Image (spheres, grey):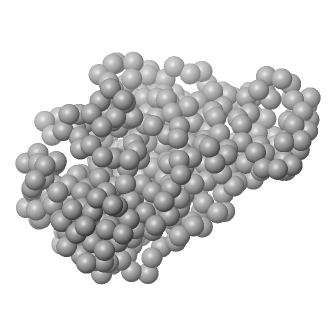
Amino acid sequence: MRDGSLDRFLRVFGIIACLLGPAFAQSLPKGLTDQDFAPVNEAEAQLGRLLFYDPILSGNKTVACATCHHPDFGTSDGVSLSIGDGGIGLGPDRRIDPDNPPEQRIPRNSPALFNLGAREFTVMFHDGRLEADPNHPGGLRSPLDADMMQGFASVLSAQTMFPVLSRDEMAGSYDENEIGRAVRQGLVTGDGGAWDLLSRRVGEIDTYAVLFAQIYPHIETGADIAFTDISNAIAAFIEIEWRSDTAPFDAMLRGETTLDGAAQRGLELFYGDAGCARCHSGPFLTDHAFHAMGAPQIGPGKAATFEDHQRDDGRFRVTGQRSDRYAFRTPSLRNVTLTAPYGHAGAHKDLASFIAAHADPKAALETYDPTQAVLVDPVDADFAVMRDPEQRRQIADAVTTDAVALSKADIAALVAFLETLTDPIAIEGRMGVPDSVPSRLKVP
């Protein structure tokens, strides 16, 4: 804790405790410190910055990590379901390329990247299919299991590299490029696998070969670059660029300021009667667990190639446990007012409307307004699940929490509190968007 701030913190904390009672005060998280984050090599992060914005890592060399995770849209892309490969433009202005249309939209909303380098973030993706686990090869449990490469510096590093294997995110189709073909054939790791082919691409660019050799002692030439080196650099960039611990909420936790008005009322509701903190707990406002909260299902859903449906079973697809059906990971709420649309499928573009639906999801499923979605070139089939009474019932039946009565004033107060989680430093970014990248491809 910063010098001189401990007394201020205790004084403010004591005031809150007296006003709101001990149960509320005990719910407040501790303030974040450097100990909550792993140290990062800045030179490595600078290299990762170039790779993050470079389309060289996509099969058709048209999509970068930043295409779906751009700082202009709160490190997401401002739409319900992204268009990766086969899209033109950025954010809500992105459209399907008529000369190379994708087979389908990406089935889940693009998550924000804030604080993913913090030590407590050990589970990734909406369904948690990638997780730190010392009992698995390389310390990671993933869909690749024993085939997972070793050498990822963190679970974040491993996470950054799965989109390059997705046909609709970055790889492209098998008939378009060598990366798409390798993925279609199940060749991911090893010589000639998708990750190896991408590493060779990067290593053949002189600027990258020099930068990697300067940062990693085991690399002498571009041919020595492994895919884990690429992913480790990208993770280092994300860790620095979007660390978020300087919002007004953080200043309040450190005893440097207090909240007032609607924001204070929203804080009281959040940690009190509204029950938000039961799941959105801790300094990052997430319990990192999985809950069935009845979020509307729109878009293509999550199905295997042999399946024909548009539902998304969430965590169930990872664990096979029926109790996990329609359960998704609790998202962190850092900078949440800037990361719309909301829900695993991005079914709500308005935060107040999403909070109202979240408070009584069973009722909200029956009255869902499709105009709340922000879909690129929407089609009628996008709302097939929401038009099906039986599927809506199944989603509603999975919800185990009780409805919470919230007035319009309550919801406005909660939004005011959530605005205190907006961090101007994290939103601006510490390194920014590069003007160009070593591949000379177009920066998103």
**Image position of 388 (left or right of 423):** left
Residue placed most toward the observer, 175 or 399: 175
**Image position of 245 (left or right of 302):** right
Residue 97, percent from left and from top: 25, 70
Residue 322, percent from left and from top: 34, 18
Residue 310 shows in this picture: no
Residue 42 shows in this picture: yes
Q: Quadrant of the N terminus?
A: top right
Residue 278, percent from left and from top: 63, 27
State the residue at coordinates (29%, 22%).
Answer: 320
Residue placed most toward the observer, 219 or 255: 219
Which image quarter: residue 29? top right
Q: Is residue 173 above or below residue 13?
A: below
Q: Quadrant of the C terminus?
A: bottom left
**Image position of 143 (left or right of 130):** left
State the residue at coordinates (91%, 38%).
Answer: 11
Give the total of numbered labels: 0
Q: Is residue 285 above or below residue 226?
A: above
Residue 282, percent from left and from top: 64, 34
Q: Is residue 168 above or below residue 131?
A: below
State the residue at coordinates (36%, 69%).
Answer: 214
State the residue at coordinates (71%, 37%).
Answer: 30
Q: Is residue 276 above or below residue 368?
A: above
Residue placed most toward the observer, 278 or 282: 282
